[in-house]
Image (spheres, grey):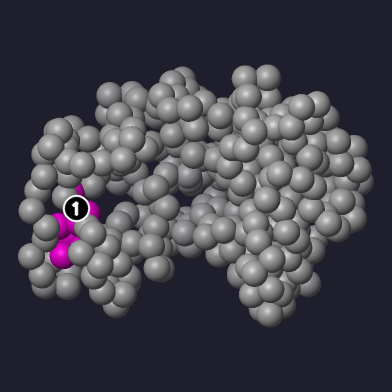
């Protein structure tokens, strides 16, 4: 494997950490400061903020056998630049600058992985959804994700390589979990009757990427836990594990939330992970209970 990673964030870094350094050609970050910190850990960083091509990336891509994309659609595309899809006015920043290079200038490429979101399914009134379910995106960010998925599918088809689209649920793990919020005093128990969410531990994202990249598997895969649950239940369970009183319940209609946070509660669904399991993946943390039992030391 010679892996190149666009977007060395929380999820992608967990996967990269599981690999031999020799298997990683490089990773992109948005600032020189972060690049310096990453270089000190034996990785080759490239600065890419989506606003312009990054120095040295073309040459690294030309050697890649595997490509992981963990950059959301977002920035405004300059006039005349490629965008992530006909329906994505803001486009995918990687495809904006590297579509031609990836499609035609990566002779050794064998596999592309794209980290997406279960938000593309939108609202299904709490019903179960799988990879064949209708996408009903509500937010503009989820609509942009679908357009980006379609654009990456076009690139993979052009190149003739498998594309694995990993649709991720709410991500948590070390440093990003309910115990951290309880310790900070920012944990809330918002109650909206009937509302459930799936979630996924970052180590299971890394594990799914390992399975799919090792086998060069393509397709859409929901990377999500076994148990969609009301968010207030998770907070109460975490508080019980460390022997404290949970924060009081707050009716959703009375809560002060940002527009983005409120929009998450407008999408209610139960997400199936059966396809990923059928591909051979065994979850390290099938539900939040196993994960929180291990993460409670962070309180």
**Which of 58/5 is in front?**
58
Image-based side of 132 in relation to 294, left or right: right
Q: Which quadrant would residue 157 be assigned to in this image?
A: top right
In this picture, is 272 found above or below 68? above
Figure quadrant of the N terminus:
bottom right
Q: Residue at x 17, y 73 (%)?
A: 242
Q: Which quadrant would residue 4 be assigned to in this image?
A: bottom right
Identify the main secondary structure in magenta.
helix
Residue that numbered label 1 is attached to:
188
Furthest toward the front, the residue is 79
Q: Residue at x 61, y 46 (%)?
A: 71
Image-based side of 292 in relation to 148, left or right: left
Residue 169 drawn at (x, y percent)? 42, 44
Q: Is residue 199 visible?
A: yes
Boundaries of the magenta span:
232-239
Q: Is residue 82 visible?
A: no
**Which of 214/79 is in front?**
79
Q: Residue at x 73, y 59 (%)?
A: 47
Q: Residue at x 13, y 37 (%)?
A: 254
**Which of 109/86 is in front?**
86
Asked which secondary structure carries label 1, the reply is loop
Residue 30 drawn at (x, y percent)? 65, 57
**Which of 19/48 is in front?**
48
Figure quadrant of the C terminus:
bottom left
Mark 1 surroundings: few (<14), some (14-19) or many (≥20) residues within 10 A? some
Image-based side of 297 in relation to 78, left or right: left
Furthest toward the bottom, the residue is 40
């Amino acid at each position: 494997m010679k892996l190149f990673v666009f977007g060395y964030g929380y999820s992608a870094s967990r996967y990269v950490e599981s690999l031999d350094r020799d298997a990683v050609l490089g990773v992109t970050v948005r600032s020189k400061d972060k690049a310096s910190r990453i270089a000190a850990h034996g990785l080759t960083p490239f600065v890419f903020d989506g606003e312009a091509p990054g120095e040295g990336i073309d040459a690294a891509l030309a050697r890649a056998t595997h490509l992981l994309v963990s950059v959301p659609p977002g920035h405004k595309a300059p006039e005349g630049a490629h965008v992530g899809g006909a329906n994505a006015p803001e486009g995918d920043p990687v495809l904006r600058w590297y579509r031609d290079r990836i499609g035609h200038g990566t002779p050794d490429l064998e596999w592309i992985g794209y980290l997406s979101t279960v938000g593309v399914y939108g609202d299904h009134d709490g019903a179960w959804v799988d990879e064949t379910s209708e996408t009903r995106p509500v937010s503009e960010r989820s609509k942009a994700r679908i357009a980006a998925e379609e654009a990456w599918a076009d690139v993979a088809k052009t190149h003739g390589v498998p594309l694995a689209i990993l649709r991720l649920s709410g991500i948590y793990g070390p440093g990003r979990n309910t115990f951290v919020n309880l310790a900070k005093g920012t944990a809330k128990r918002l109650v909206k009757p009937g509302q459930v969410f799936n979630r996924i531990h970052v180590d299971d994202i890394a594990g799914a990427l390992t399975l799919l990249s090792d086998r060069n598997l393509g397709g859409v895969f929901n990377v999500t836990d076994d148990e969609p649950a009301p968010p207030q239940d998770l907070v109460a369970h975490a508080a019980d594990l460390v022997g404290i009183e949970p924060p009081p319940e707050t009716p959703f209609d009375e809560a002060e939330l940002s527009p983005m946070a409120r929009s998450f509660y407008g999408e209610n669904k139960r997400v199936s992970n059966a396809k990923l399991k059928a591909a051979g993946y065994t979850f390290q943390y099938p539900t939040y209970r196993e994960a929180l039992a291990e993460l409670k030391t962070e309180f």
